[in-house]
Image (cartoon, coloured by chain):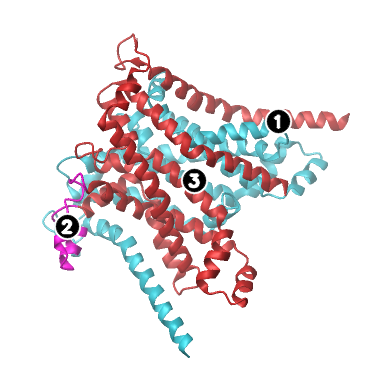
Chain colours: A red, B cyan
């Protein structure tokens, strides 16, 4: 009996602890999402007292717009890029550094530093790097005798996305690097020693032993990269505002332009709902996996 | 003999790759720093070192954006503390609850991580206005705390789950209630996790542009990121003052990371890296 009342007191404490976070979640996630979906079925400029119901028109108009489809394509390219380039580069750097190199600590700090700086600082610095006449990229190419490769890095619609991706790779590789590096350090040395004694080459040791054991780190890096790619806004907005001629636009910047530049709230909300659906399809398996995996680790 | 020279060649190769990469990683930061001290006439010569420390760039940056740096500090420090608190009070019961109720709440809170902020942006704009918190610093505290719930819960729940359960059971036998256990024992024992999360949250909040650009409009609450974004994307960019304000915006989080990096890496391993 005494045991039972202790249990229920614990339960009540748990519920009391969860009350405020749950309330914030309801007010700042659930309510706005429902409200956006509602808004996307209307035509509204954000000021007038009445919203006009227009059904799915916003969605069908967007689906036929080259500007919208181009932004969707850009988002998909960004997801692919974020999953492969910063992740791969971070893994490579971590694997090299894990072999025990002099000055390891200095390298570790250098590779992580860019990740600590604000997106707008990345944008400001790389606008200067990419400055077509005097920027560092063009200057170095000229010095190397490769001046012919210089581009109008942020002004040419054919090049601008690659330029942005270069800046973002510089910015986010440090995160993947640090998580992989910590993961490699967590692998018991006996596993690696055992494989070495069996006569495995360093290459085989890495791919057959280390890499599979790195799975917890890999899943974190991939998940965070996909989430960041879908939410991508700051770097693009601060560097190009989606230009030139919408060529570097992603859904987030297009939505911001429609909502707070043109006050077409219903259309903007429809863009956001599309983004929500795409993000859900890509990221939901990850969330399910993460919530299950943690339960499993507890069961052990 | 042959194998040792092969190993040597490999070491030289890896060192070269590492040093090359390190230069690429550091060069933009160095160039930004040097540019911030150059006079307007020197600025176009990107590979040179400034002849004198030209502080004028910093003076201009502070004149235009000084207030926004103060706002960034006033927003970030309390919002980080609040978001750690909210993640801890949500993570604690979720780490200890048995049964489907806890799992369900945890899953629902985690789904918040996949929500692109764009879908909350317009309703949030009107919601914050109705609350009377538009363009205020406390409004930014509230918003940053609320949107930290999914990640901070995830992080602290995993960290608490790695704290030995025997500590909890011993405390309960000693007659310590579950709430007392949390405040008196669990939270003080979690400093490395909290420190790591504090760095992650400082970075997220100090660096935020999206919420700031949506919910602030004047020097009343506008943080430095909005001011710098405005400078950077204008048509005629003055790179001297821009780089000066960029350097100032970089320093706080970078310094925090450099000072606390040991506990950061440790906390990352104990929490999310498990």
Pointer 3 and pointer 1 on the same chain: yes
The 10 Å Cα crowd at callout 3, few under 14, some 14 to 19, many 20 or more, is some
Task: Identify the subunit bearing mark 3.
Answer: A
Q: SS for tag 1?
A: helix
> Which residue ends up furthest to the right in the rendered image?
A1
Residue in the picture at 37% in, 70% down: B17
Task: Determine whether A177 is above or below B64 in the image.
Answer: below
Task: Identify the subunit bearing mark 2.
Answer: A
Q: Say whether residue B72 is magenta.
A: no
Residue in the picture at 38% in, 69% down: B18
Q: Nearer the viewer, mark 1 or mark 2?
A: 2
The 10 Å Cα crowd at callout 1, few under 14, some 14 to 19, many 20 or more, is some
Disc 3/disc 2 C-alpha distance (Å): 35 Å
The residue carrying mark 2 is A150
Write the start and end of the magenta stretch as one range: A131-158
Task: Determine whether B71 is above or below A87 in the image.
Answer: above
The residue carrying mark 1 is A13
Q: Is residue B220 left or right of residue A158?
A: right
Q: Quadrant of residue B23?
A: bottom left
The residue carrying mark 3 is A223
């Amino acid at each position: 009996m005494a045991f039972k009342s202790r249990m229920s007191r614990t339960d009540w404490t748990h519920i009391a602890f969860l009350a405020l976070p749950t309330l914030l979640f309801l007010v700042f996630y659930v309510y706005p999402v429902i409200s956006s979906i509602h808004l996307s079925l209307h035509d509204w400029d954000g000021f007038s007292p009445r919203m006009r119901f227009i059904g799915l028109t916003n969605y069908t108009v967007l689906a036929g717009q080259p500007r919208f489809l181009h932004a969707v394509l850009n988002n998909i390219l960004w997801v692919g890029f974020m999953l492969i380039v910063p992740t791969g580069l971070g893994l490579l750097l971590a694997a090299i550094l894990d072999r025990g190199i002099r000055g390891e600590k200095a390298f570790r700090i250098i590779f992580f530093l860019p990740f600590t700086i604000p997106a707008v600082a990345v944008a400001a610095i790389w606008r200067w790097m990419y400055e077509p006449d005097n920027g560092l990229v063009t200057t170095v190419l000229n010095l190397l005798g490769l001046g012919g490769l210089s581009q109008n890095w942020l002004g040419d619609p054919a090049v601008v996305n690659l330029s942005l991706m270069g800046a973002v790779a510089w910015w986010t590789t440090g995160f993947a690097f640090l998580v992989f590096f910590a993961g490699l350090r967590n692998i018991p040395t006996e596993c690696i020693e055992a494989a070495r004694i069996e006569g495995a080459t360093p290459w085989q040791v890495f791919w057959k032993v280390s890499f599979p054991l790195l799975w917890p780190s890999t899943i974190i890096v991939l998940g965070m990269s996909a989430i960041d790619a879908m939410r991508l806004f700051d770097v693009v907005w601060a560097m190009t505002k989606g230009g030139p001629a919408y060529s570097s636009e992603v859904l987030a910047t297009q939505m911001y332009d429609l909502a707070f530049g043109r006050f077409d709230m219903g259309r903007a909300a429809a863009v956001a709902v599309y983004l929500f659906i795409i993000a859900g399809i890509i990221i939901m398996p990850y969330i399910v996996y993460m919530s299950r995996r943690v339960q499993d680790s507890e069961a052990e | 003999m042959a194998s040792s020279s092969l190993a040597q060649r490999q070491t030289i190769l890896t060192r070269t790759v590492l040093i090359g990469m390190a230069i690429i990683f550091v060069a933009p930061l160095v160039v930004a720093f040097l540019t911030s001290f150059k006079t307007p006439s020197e600025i176009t010569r990107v590979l040179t070192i400034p002849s004198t420390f030209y502080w004028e760039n910093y003076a201009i940056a502070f004149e235009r954006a000084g207030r926004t740096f103060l706002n960034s500090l006033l927003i970030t420090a309390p919002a980080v503390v609040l978001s750690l608190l909210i993640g801890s009070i949500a993570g604690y019961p979720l780490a200890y609850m048995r049964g489907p109720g806890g799992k369900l709440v945890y899953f629902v809170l985690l789904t918040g991580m996949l929500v692109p902020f764009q879908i909350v942006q317009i309703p949030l704009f009107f919601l914050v206005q109705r609350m009377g918190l538009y363009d205020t610093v406390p409004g930014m505290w509230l918003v940053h705390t609320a949107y930290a719930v999914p990640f901070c819960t995830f992080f602290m729940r995993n960290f608490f789950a790695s704290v030995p359960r025997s500590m909890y059971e011993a405390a309960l036998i000693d007659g310590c209630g579950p709430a007392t256990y949390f405040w008196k024992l669990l939270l003080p024992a979690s400093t490395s996790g909290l420190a790591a999360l504090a760095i992650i949250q400082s970075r997220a909040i100090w660096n935020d542009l999206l919420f700031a650009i949506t919910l602030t409009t004047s020097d009343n609450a506008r943080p430095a990121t909005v001011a710098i974004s405005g400078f950077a994307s204008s048509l005629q960019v003055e790179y001297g003052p821009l780089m000066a304000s960029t350097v100032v915006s970089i320093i706080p989080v970078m310094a925090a990371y450099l000072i606390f990096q040991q506990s950061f890496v440790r906390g990352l391993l104990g929490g999310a890296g498990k």
